[in-house]
Amino acid sequence: STANHSIVKTMTRRRYQGNNRWMIVASISLFLCGVVVLVIGTDDTDNHHPANQKICDSRFVPSKVDTSLFVGGEATAQAYKPNAPVKTHVCEESSSNGNNQLHKAAHWSFWRSDYKDNVPIFIKANLFSCNGGAAATRENEEVTMEVWQPRPDGTYSSIRPGIEEGDCRASVPIATTTANNENDSLIDTNRIGTVEFETFAPGSIGILNGLVPPSSRDYPPYKPGAIHMFLNIDGYQPLLTQLSMSELNDWIPNKISKGRFKLSNGKKSFNNKGSGIEIQSVTPTSQSGYKLAIEVEVNFFLVGNDKETNDTIEDIFCSHSLHRGRLSWIPSFFKEPISVCSAAHMDFYAL
């Protein structure tokens, strides 16, 4: 009986000592958590006042146009052509020659499928100033966002001036907005405008980057189609960015998209490279006459500048490497707009 009583006392003492250890560990953990909360709580940043916080600090927004982001990725800036007509429907279902187009979408790099039905896309873009700047305006001129993309068949319209103007190209008007009152959230007080437009899903482009006539063939490997966007607003750094169909596919349940836009080049999403764009939502919807339609909302983030006048299109896009040697023009040719930076090359190609 005495031995049993000693064993019980020993076990009780050990259990008590074990509980004490856990209580000490828990107390230290709570103390450290309290210190972390205190440090965070005493940060000088006021989360509700735009003067003390920049909404772009964690978004890696580019401070200048960088066409190298497109090289080897899912699209290229080669096909940009300035002075697109002002409209809100970027790409029509019929091509410039009046023929309805098949939607050519690649499931993998060496095979592209033909779909008889196209996919309407409705895009709303919210424009925000990283520094709480002025609304998107331009003196004596309507401020717009330039949008261009491959046609549903995976070809771009001609990049030559005066040919196929407005075929899957548009200058979309920007509706300017300003903060309503001091109680608006940070994201609202930094909103400078909105853009809304309609288009059809771009087709997958091939090794020739979609710069072939519709009657010709673009060869594999194929890349996802992309909707390109360019903003050049007074008081802000120019922004060149894009929406890839493979990125939109990540938001759509496979039972709805059936893997139609699932092609990926195996690299990180373009949105992770400091593109100044952030997808907010992608919603499958219905529209009469179509099996699938998509509504997309995105945010653009613009960095302010102090320049009195904007740079020219050539200064924004072109590296001027064409004059640095016999072969130095080759990398630029595949990433910079041909119609702007090397127009003389169009004399050698049926672009």
Image: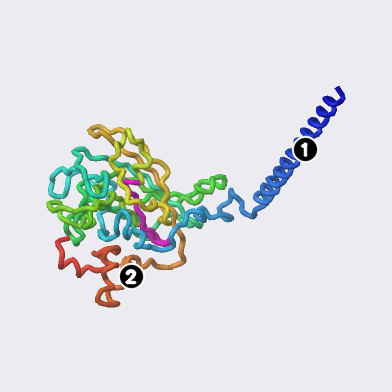
Q: Residue at x 49, y 55 (%)?
A: 56
Q: Secondary structure at mark 1?
A: helix
Q: Secondary structure at mark 2?
A: loop
Residue 27 shown left or right of residue 71 in the figure? right
Q: Amino acid at mark 2?
A: Ser
Q: Which residue has dot 2 on it?
A: 319
* Residue stretch in magenta: 231-246
Residue 324 x %, y % = 30, 77
Assign the C terminus to one quadrant of the image. bottom left
Residue 236 shown left or right of residue 153 in the figure? right
Q: How far is the residue under mark 2 from the one under mark 1? A: 69 Å
Q: Which mark is residue 20?
A: 1
Residue 23 x %, y % = 75, 38
Residue 172 x %, y % = 31, 51
Q: Amino acid at mark 1?
A: Asn
Q: Is residue 304 magenta?
A: no
Compared with residue 63, is residue 99 higher up or lower down, i.e. above or below? Answer: above
